[in-house]
Image (cartoon, rainbow, N blue to C red):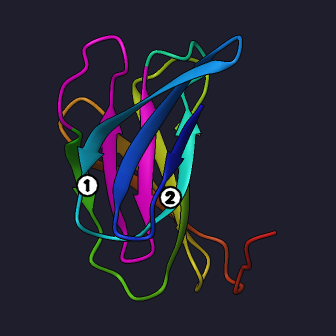
Amino acid sequence: LYFSAQEGILIFYHIKDLQYEIKICADISQPISSLLFSPDYTSLLLVTDQGTVYSYRPAHSGEAVKLLDTSSSCFLAADFLTPGNNYCVSVTISGEVQVWSLEDGTFLSKLNLGTEVQAA
C-alpha cells in the first residue's frame, strides 16, 4: 500500500498477515495531490498541486526523480499516456493538454481544448 503524507512524503506499508512494515520511500517536500501507477506497475507518478511531477520506481527503491515542473498555478492533473510508460499527459484548468516525455521531462506537444476543465 502506497500513500503520501501531507508534507510530501511517499510511504509504503507492507502488510502480511497481522504484521506490517512501514518504509519511507521518498520526500519531495511538496504536498502530493495524486499517485498514479503506470499500466505495467513499474513506475509511480507523484503529482503536486504546483505542477511538479516526479517518478518513483518501486523495484529500484531509489529516490523520486523530478520529471517536469510546469510551475503553473492553474495546473490540474497528470497521468500516464498509454499504451506504454514513455509519456505523460497533463492538463491545466484553462484546458491546455500537454504531452511530456517521461524519460527526460521534455515538453513534446500541446492542445488547447478552448474551455475550462475541472477534476472529477
Secondary structure type for disc 1: strand
Q: Position of residue 43 (x, y in %)?
A: 42, 24
Determine whether, in the image, residue 34 is placed left or right of residue 62: right
- Does 61 appear in magenta? yes
Q: Give the mark nearer the N terminus: 1 vs 2.
A: 1
Q: Few, some or many C-alpha atoms within 10 Å of disc 1 (few <14, some 14-19, many ≥20)?
A: many
Q: Which residue is located at x 56 percent, y 64 percent?
A: 77
Q: Quadrant of residue 73?
A: bottom left
Determine whether, in the image, residue 64 is placed left or right of residue 48: left
In percent of width and height, residue 21 lies at 46, 25
Checking the image for residue 114, the label placed there is none
Q: CA distance from mark 1 to mark 2?
A: 10 Å
- Residue beneath label 2, please? 90
Asked if labels 2 and 1 touch by Cβ distance under 8 angstroms, the answer is yes
Amino acid type shown at disc 1: Leu
Q: Which residue is mark 1?
A: 68
Quarter that holds the N terminus: top right
Asked which quadrant contains residue 55, the reply is top left
Residue placed most toward the observer, 119 or 92: 119
Residue 106 visible to an observer of this rendering: no
Three-letter amino acid code of the residue under disc 2: Ser
Q: Tell me which residue sits at (45%, 61%) in the image.
A: 5
User: Of residues 31 and 94, which is closer to you in this image?
Assistant: 31
Instruction: Tell me where the magenta segment starts and ends, as one range.
Output: 43-63
Q: Of 77 and 8, which appears nearest the observer?
A: 8
